[in-house]
Image (spheres, rainbow, N blue to C red):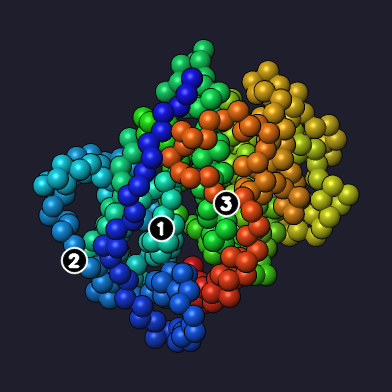
Amino acid sequence: MVVQQRQLTEHLPTHFAIQSIVNHRMQPLRVLRSRSPIRARIQACATVGLTSDQIVAERSASAMDDYLKLEKLGEGTYGVVYKARHKTTGKIVALKKIRLESEDEGVPSTAIREISVLKELQHPNIVRLLDVLMQEKKLFLVFEFLSMDLKKYLDLLPKDGGMDPVVIKSYCFQLLQALLFCHKRRILHRDLKPQNLLIDNLGTIKMADFGLARCAGVPLRVYTHEIVTLWYRAPEVLLGCPRYSDAVDIWSVGCIFAEMFLKKPLFQGDAEIDQLFRIFRMLTTPTEESWPGVTSFPDYKAHFPTWTENTLEKTLSSRMPPAAIDLLKETLVYNPVRRISAKAACKHPYFADLDKTTLPAPIEDLTDTNGLKAAVGHDCGILNNILSNSNI
């Protein structure tokens, strides 16, 4: 079957701006000499800790009174997501209400990140941020509405049925295209999971919830390891590695890829140590030979049980075709340096028979991107300093 896709041509409207005022507790930013494409994001992130009246939303045709809340879709740490309808146009949107608990606390850092990242990442496989609105002590992010996420879709599948293999292939390629788009711009999502992947009835899948996204500096810097829902967390993060790269997103995609075939998580641990051991049981316990430096990680223990047989292929051979298993193996390589990149994954033979003309996004340029990375590296370093100093 051919998956019908929608060619999205709309661009993210510039409905808002965040006033770039640096909090008095932070050192002033030095002005960037060049007109960098990341400059707006750096300035946006500099607002961490500001009070709500310092967040400036440009007045567009939309205001909170123009939306009618229809139902609550979900609730998270920083707020609630509603399905809503624009009273005039009838357009259905998703309203993400961000709680501003007090004037002293200001806007949550996750909201600042999501706004600033989505402002830059305009891609058909990344959810579109349509507007940002303020109402009293509440910040509302207005997103395009997609009726279902991948987790709900998998849960609704019949017990004796599964996802169409062609759909799985299309979804996986679209996710890798979106990741390639992000990684070329030094953006790490860091929280990929089925709940954060939205789908429509036209065969499109979109990455959402960029609240934990980071700009990867050059060289890699120290990050918090409290990222990514446990089942999709890369082993270097589970072992407390203080520096990690965009390879953490690739591991997550691999886990999601397998889950689309299995209809259940590949590694379903109930705690970090259990998660590690489930990975080790299937992929073997890592050693210095297979993963140089692993024994020096903070949470590595010399007394870890030793599993020596890799059972991945045996476990999945009845559910996944050989080419899919080969791609999965490449995404689940222990050593992040050797783990396949989004660019290389897009060129994997598994996708050779995918009709790419039906995809919603133009095929990302798979040529060398070192020039782009060098251009944004300096600005990302400044951004990461801002985030670090702000305890985000």
Residue kind at label 2, given as amino acid type: Arg
For the residue labelled by badge 3, is the local secondary structure a helix, a strand or a loop?
loop
Q: Is residue 221 visible?
A: no
Task: Name the image quarter holding residue 54.
Answer: bottom left
Q: Are marks 1 and 2 in contact (CB under 8 Å)?
A: no
For the residue labelled by badge 1, is the local secondary structure a helix, a strand or a loop?
helix
For the residue labelled by badge 2, is the local secondary structure a helix, a strand or a loop?
loop
Question: In the displayed structure, would residue 340 be above or below residue 320?
Answer: below
- Front in this rendered view, residue 26 or 187: 187
Compute the Cα span from label 2 to label 3: 36 Å
Residue pictured at 65% horizontal, 63% vertical: 370
Crowdedness near tag 3: few (<14), some (14–19) or many (≥20) residues, C-alpha within 10 Å: few
* Earlier sequence position, callout 3 versus callout 1: 1
User: Which residue of the protein is positioned furthest toward the top in this rendering?
Assistant: 160
Left/right placement of residue 231 relative to residue 310 reads left
Residue kind at label 3, given as amino acid type: Asp
Q: Which residue is mark 1?
A: 118
Q: Are marks 2 and 3 in contact (CB under 8 Å)?
A: no
Crowdedness near tag 2: few (<14), some (14–19) or many (≥20) residues, C-alpha within 10 Å: few
> Looking at the image, is mark 2 or mark 3 nearer the viewer?
3
Residue 67 locus on image (x, y percent): 16, 49
Q: Which residue is mark 2?
A: 59
- Front in this rendered view, residue 227 or 184: 184
Residue pictured at 17% horizontal, 57% vertical: 62
Q: Which residue is mark 3?
A: 365
